Image (cartoon, grey):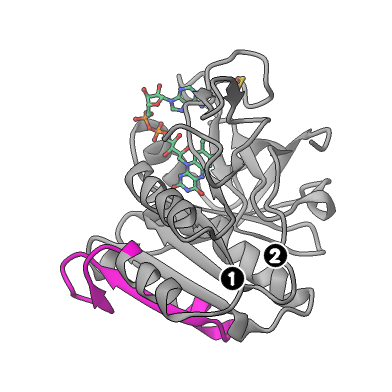
């Protein structure tokens, strides 16, 4: 884990995406060059009665010191965050946690994103392509309840990856649960594959089961309540399949398929 920093940053760019989603880009963040896909930051909510910082995956960074998060209004903290005006200051702690391990160059990458789980996976795809991976070796499955849950689709498509939107009501892409076309893809492929997934626990459980069923290795990004974010409070502990325990904030949030009791 990288020794994190705690910077006051300015909200430089604010985009109101659809369906209560927002993209916030902050600048400057001094450790931007240390950030990797899978890392997260914790934001202090200024001038509110909210004590605990809120954790968000890093969605993108630039070499100029920009750092982006994409979040959905969930409760009080994210609703207040969404009201922050451009030019406002926020204290940002990070980068936190472990990052994804990149796949081998001969592996097909299967990304399984659900709801607010897509930002770290979009960041992973961007960094993989920057490192010379063929975009066509990346299969980006993105599931949501309806078309409004599939965010930044043109941004993802522009990467040149294979994009497979899936909605439960069939309003966009394939109808059903995202893990069904993933399973069909795995069954139809003879290539070596690696899974990366982030999203609701039910989806992570299904992704974990698919990896174990078809012996496809991979990594899952988990969420948990995170009062401190740096391994001290034990508020984020989960049980592992070997009977031991792990802190999601610093032993994760990235874990291997089959590692955690989901
Ligand atoms: C590693 C990680 C990455 C995440 N990435 C994203 C992302 O990229 N985009 C996104 O939309 N969401 C992301 N989330 C989820 C996001 O952090 C929650 O939606 C947000 O914290 C909800 O806060 P709220 O105040 O709006 O909701 P509330 O309803 O007020 O909070 C939910 C409940 O959780 C408790 N709680 C909230 N935060 C904490 C905390 N830090 N410590 C202890 N208890 C807490 C509150 O007290 C409350 O009981 C991520 C979560 C984790 C753990
Ligand atoms: S959030 Fe405190 S130990 Fe993980």
* Label disc, if present, on residue 189 of the rendered structure: none
Residue hosting label 1: 109
Residue 205 falls in image quadrant: top left
Q: Residue furthest top?
A: 233
Instruction: Measure the C-alpha gap from mark 1 to mark 2.
Output: 7 Å
Q: Residue at x 43, y 55 (%)?
A: 213
**Do labels 1 and 2 touch, CB within 8 Å?**
yes
Q: Is residue 168 above or below residue 2?
A: below
Magenta-span inclusion, residue 118: no
For marks 1 and 2 on the same chain, the one whose residue lies earlier in the sequence = 2
Magenta-span inclusion, residue 155: yes
Q: Residue at x 27, y 66 (%)?
A: 148
**Where does the image place residue 217, in percent across and percent down from the top left?**
59, 56
Residue hosting label 2: 103
The part of the chain drawn in magenta is 154-179
Q: Is residue 39 above or below residue 8?
A: below
Please tell me which residue lies in front, 20 or 231.
Answer: 231
Tell me if I can see residue 88 in this picture: yes
> For ligand 1, which image quadrant applies?
top left
**Where does the image place residue 193, in percent across and percent down from the top left?**
58, 69
The N terminus - image quarter: top right
Mark 1 Cα shell of 10 Å, populated few (<14), some (14-19), many (≥20): many
Q: Residue at x 66, y 73 (%)?
A: 107
């Amino acid at each position: 884990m990288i020794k994190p920093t705690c910077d006051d940053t300015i909200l430089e760019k604010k985009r109101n995406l659809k369906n209560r989603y927002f993209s916030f880009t902050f600048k400057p963040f001094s450790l931007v060059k240390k950030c990797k896909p899978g890392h997260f930051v914790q934001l202090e909510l200024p001038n509110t009665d909210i004590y605990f910082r809120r954790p968000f995956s890093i969605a993108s960074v630039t070499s100029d010191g920009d750092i982006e998060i994409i979040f959905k209004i969930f409760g009080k903290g994210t609703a207040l965050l969404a009201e922050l005006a451009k030019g406002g200051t926020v204290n940002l702690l990070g980068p936190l946690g472990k990052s994804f391990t990149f796949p081998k160059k001969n592996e097909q990458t299967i990304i399984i994103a659900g709801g607010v789980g897509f930002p770290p996976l979009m960041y992973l795809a961007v960094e993989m392509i920057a490192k010379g991976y063929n975009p066509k070796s990346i299969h980006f499955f993105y599931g949501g309840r309806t078309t409004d849950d599939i965010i930044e689709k043109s941004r993802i498509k522009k990467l040149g990856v294979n994009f497979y939107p899936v909605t439960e009501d069939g309003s966009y892409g394939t109808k059903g649960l995202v893990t069904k076309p993933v399973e069909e893809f795995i069954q139809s492929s003879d290539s070596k594959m690696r899974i990366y997934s982030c999203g609701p626990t039910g989806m992570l459980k299904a992704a974990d089961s698919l990896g174990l069923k078809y012996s496809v290795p991979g990594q899952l990004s988990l969420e948990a309540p995170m009062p401190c974010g740096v391994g001290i409070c034990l508020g984020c502990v989960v049980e592992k399949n070997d009977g031991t325990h792990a802190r999601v904030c610093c032993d994760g949030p990235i874990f291997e398929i089959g590692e955690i009791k989901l």
